[in-house]
C-alpha cells in the first residue's frame, strides 16, 4: 500500500513537472494558474497543483471557496480603534471587556497581531501601524497610524505602550520617532526583548521566543541607547 502511494506521488510529481514545462492547452486552466501564481509565496508549480486540486472537487466545494473569498473582500473592515482587521467597526479584541485597556502593543501589521495572540502571553490591546518608517521605500510617518496612537494615549487610560516591531533599522527608527511623540505623556514605554534576532521578521518567530520577548520587555530609553 505504501509503495503504491509513493508511486502515485512520484507519478503526480512527474505530471506537474511536465505540465510546467509544456504549453498548457487549456486557456481556462492557464488563466487560473496565472492568477494563483500572483499570490505571495505561490510559484507556478504550486499554483498548478492547487488548480488541479480544485478541478477534482465538487462544484459545491469550489463555490463555497469562491463565496468565502468574495464575502471576505466585500464585507471585511478595519477596527476604528486599533486598525486591526475586523468584521465590524470595532474588532473582537478591542470589544473584549476582559482585555487590559491600560496596555497597548504597537505592531507593524495584522500578521503580527496573529503571531502575538498565538503565544497566549499577552492580554492587552493592540495598535496596528500599517507599516514602519522607511524613507527608501517612500514610507513616512504620515502614512502610518501614529497620530491615532497618540490620540489613544491622550485619553489618559493608557499606562504602558509596548513596541513589538521587527528588530531592524526601520523598526528602530519607527520606535524612536513614536517614543518622541509620546514623551509628554505619563506612561511606560517598553519594547520586546532581544529574543527576536536583529534583522528578523516578527511573524516568523516561534511562539515560545515571541512569548518570552513580551514577558521580558525592556524600557525603550535603555533599548534605544544601545
Image (cartoon, rainbow, N blue to C red):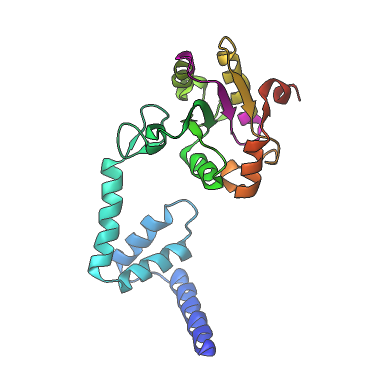
Q: Give the x, y percent position of residue 131.
A: 51, 32
Picture quadrant where residue 191 is located: top right
Pick out the residue farthest to the top: 184
Residue at 52 percent of width and 40 percent of height: 112
Q: Give the x, y percent position of residue 49.
A: 42, 68
* Frontmost residue, 191 versus 131: 191
Task: Tell me the quarter of the image containing the C terminus.
Answer: top right
Q: Is residue 199 above or below residue 5?
A: above
Picture quadrant where residue 163 is located: top right
Q: Which residues are magenta?
A: 153-171
Can see residue 130? Answer: no
Q: Is residue 161 magenta?
A: yes
Q: Is residue 223 above or below residue 20?
A: above
- Left or right of 31, for residue 157: right
Residue at 55 percent of width and 38 percent of height: 122
Residue at 51 percent of width and 86 percent of height: 7
Amino acid at each position: 500500500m505504501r509503495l503504491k502511494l509513493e508511486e502515485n506521488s512520484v507519478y503526480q510529481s512527474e505530471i506537474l513537472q511536465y505540465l510546467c514545462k509544456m504549453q498548457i492547452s487549456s486557456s481556462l486552466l492557464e488563466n487560473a494558474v496565472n492568477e494563483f501564481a500572483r499570490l505571495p509565496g505561490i510559484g507556478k508549480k504550486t499554483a498548478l497543483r492547487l488548480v488541479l486540486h480544485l478541478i477534482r472537487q465538487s462544484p459545491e466545494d469550489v463555490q463555497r471557496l469562491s463565496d468565502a473569498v468574495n464575502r471576505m473582500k466585500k464585507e471585511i473592515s478595519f477596527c476604528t480603534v486599533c486598525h486591526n482587521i475586523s468584521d465590524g467597526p470595532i474588532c473582537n479584541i478591542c470589544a473584549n471587556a476582559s482585555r487590559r485597556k491600560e496596555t497597548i502593543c504597537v505592531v507593524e501589521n495584522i500578521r503580527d497581531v496573529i503571531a502575538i495572540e498565538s503565544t497566549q502571553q499577552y492580554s492587552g490591546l493592540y495598535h496596528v501601524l500599517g507599516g514602519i518608517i522607511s524613507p527608501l521605500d517612500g514610507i513616512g510617518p504620515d502614512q502610518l497610524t501614529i497620530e491615532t496612537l497618540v490620540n489613544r494615549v491622550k485619553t489618559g487610560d493608557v499606562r504602558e505602550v509596548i513596541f513589538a516591531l521587527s528588530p531592524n533599522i526601520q523598526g528602530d527608527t519607527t520606535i524612536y520617532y513614536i517614543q518622541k511623540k509620546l514623551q509628554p505623556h505619563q506612561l511606560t514605554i517598553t519594547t520586546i526583548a532581544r529574543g527576536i534576532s536583529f534583522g528578523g521578521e516578527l511573524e516568523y518567530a516561534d511562539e515560545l521566543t515571541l512569548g518570552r520577548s513580551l514577558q521580558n520587555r525592556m524600557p525603550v530609553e535603555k533599548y534605544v541607547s544601545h
